[in-house]
Amino acid sequence: MEILIITGPPYSGKGTQCDILKEQLDFTHISTGDRCRSEKQNKTEIGKIMSAYEEKGDLVPDSIMKDLFSQILDENKDKNGIILDGYPRTKSQVDDLIDLTNAKNLQIGKVLNIEVPKEELLKRAKKRAETSTRKDDKDASIHLKRIDVFESSTKPAVEYMKTKLKVDSFNGLGSVDDITDRIKSCL
């Protein structure tokens, strides 16, 4: 199984691009946010712990995410590949994921990093809030907090990944098709 990582700030279009790529590559899309919401909705042990963090827009502790991703890797071991969307988000999670994949004899093929200016992210967040059914998408203060958390925690993790993995960064502005074409040129 090959692992592809899609990273970028909230509202950068990661989920949209993952949906396109999963069809083209015959990979499974693992959205960290969707999985965390599922764990919470099903009131699993991990889900209960996550609830307090995620509803405030905070990151779930790395140790909890490592346990969850070990479980996800085991669940998908027979797939052609997986696309990770929203993980890793911290330097520690980068190391945890590399350790997990090495221990399970898996390979991280590439990291695709979508770059979008903050002003555009806030416009996209507002637009998504108009159609979303997610409670956390309705709160503009959480939009800004998510972006700030990305800047302070995840952006340094992306820079750190560049020292450990193959990372391609590209402009996330333009049409969905334009961005898909940029991703395809990286693959």
Image (tube, rainbow, N blue to C red):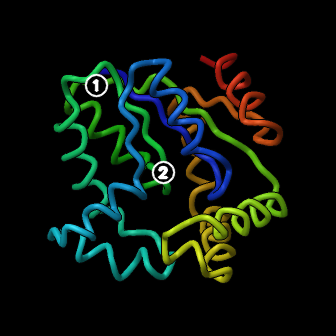
**Lower position in the chain sequence, tag 2 or tag 1:** 2
Residue 64 appears at what percent x and percent y? Answer: 27, 64
Q: How many marks overall?
A: 2
Query: Residue flagged by tag 2: what amino acid is it?
Result: Gly
Name the outermost residue toward the front: 131
What residue is shown with label 2? 86
Residues packed near mark 1 inside 10 Å, few (<14), some (14 to 19) or many (20 plus): some
Residue 141 appears at what percent x and percent y? Answer: 66, 83
Query: Residue flagged by tag 1: what amino acid is it?
Result: Leu
User: In the picture shown, does residue 111 fall above or below 159?
Assistant: above
Residues packed near mark 2 inside 10 Å, few (<14), some (14 to 19) or many (20 plus): many
Q: Considering the image in quadrants, where does the C terminus appear?
A: top right
83 left or right, relative to 11: left
**Residue depicted at 46% across the width and 23% down the height:** 23
**Residue depicted at 62% across the width and 54% down the height:** 156
User: In the picture shown, does residue 160 fall above or below 25?
Assistant: below
**Nearest to the observer: residue 167 or residue 14:** 14
Is mark 2 in CB contact (under 8 Å) with mark 1?
Answer: no
Residue 4 appears at what percent x and percent y? Answer: 46, 29
Q: Secondary structure at mark 2?
A: loop
- 2 vs 1, front mark: 2
Residue 127 appears at what percent x and percent y? Answer: 72, 64
> Which image quadrant for residue 75?
top left
152 left or right, relative to 2: right
User: In the picture shown, does residue 128 fall above or below 48?
Assistant: above
What residue is shown with label 1? 106
User: In the picture shown, does residue 18 fall above or below 157?
Assistant: above
Calculate the distance from the C-alpha at mark 2 to the C-alpha at mark 1: 19 Å
Q: Secondary structure at mark 1?
A: loop
Q: Considering the image in quadrants, where does the N terminus appear?
A: top left
